[in-house]
Image (cartoon, rainbow, N blue to C red):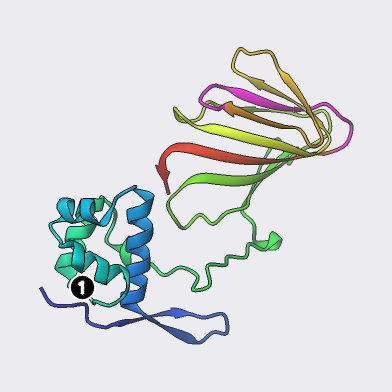
Amino acid sequence: MSKLDTSQIYHQGDGGGLDCIELPVIVGKNLRRIRLRQGLSLERLAKQSGVSRAMLGQIETGKSTPTIGLLWKICTSLTVPFASLIAIGNPEGIIVLRRDGSKLLSSNQGQFTSRALFPFDSERRTEFYELRLAPLYCENAEAHAAGTRENLVVAKGSVEIAVGSARPTTLREGDAMLFEADVPHAYRNLGTDEAVLYLVMTYAQMIG
């Protein structure tokens, strides 16, 4: 199997031009990120993939341009798509999500809105949302996948959170709450002004 056709890969820059990025560096950073996320040492990955520890180390440091066959072996061992090793992230590690371009979900004619504060284009176990509830409105949520947890903090107003059959909990501005969200739950605005909450949702398994 031959090496990748090019040692460089291009992506659209902010100025409309093409920025050149060294492919070995991209592969190395992605491999290290995925390996650490799965809790694997270089030795363990070497045993799983059949690729030597020395070669894996060279790939992670961008000192070696691996063959396509080698990358396939590594991807198969890690059970990740081939594209995940050559995916281009922001070179500075900075992602800006403008309010005007936000992904906004709403229900009941806008009485409840959920704004995603994270990018959807990558695998993840955690999501971050801004929730807004109209005065005296109650939003009922279905049970999420087993093992899903929600961590809420109230930024504005007073809300009542009902989780399964447990007694509802009242939260006021600055209060936070963590609960298992794999049962039906509800958010109720107790006030006559809009309530604002921030939600961190954590899944048991990777999604996306």
In the picture, measured across the screen, residue 88 lies left or right of residue 118, that is left
User: Hey, what amino acid is under mark 1?
Assistant: Pro
User: Is 182 covered by the magenta stretch?
Assistant: yes
Within 10 Å of disc 1 (Cα), the crowding (few <14, some 14-19, many 20+) is many
Q: Is residue 26 magenta?
A: no
Query: Which quadrant of the figure has residue 199?
Result: top right
Quadrant holding the N terminus: bottom left
Residue 179: % across, % down? 59, 27
Query: Which residue is disc 1 drawn over?
Result: 66
Query: With respect to residue 206, does 160 lie above or below?
Result: above
Picture coordinates of residue 157, whole percent (x, y): 84, 35
Where residue 99 sits: x, y (%)? 70, 60
Residue 135 as seen in the image, left or right of residue 92: right
Q: Which residues are magenta?
A: 180-193
Residue drawn at point x = 31 percent, y = 75 percent: 62
Question: Residue placed farthest to the left in the image?
Answer: 1
Q: Residue furthest right?
A: 192
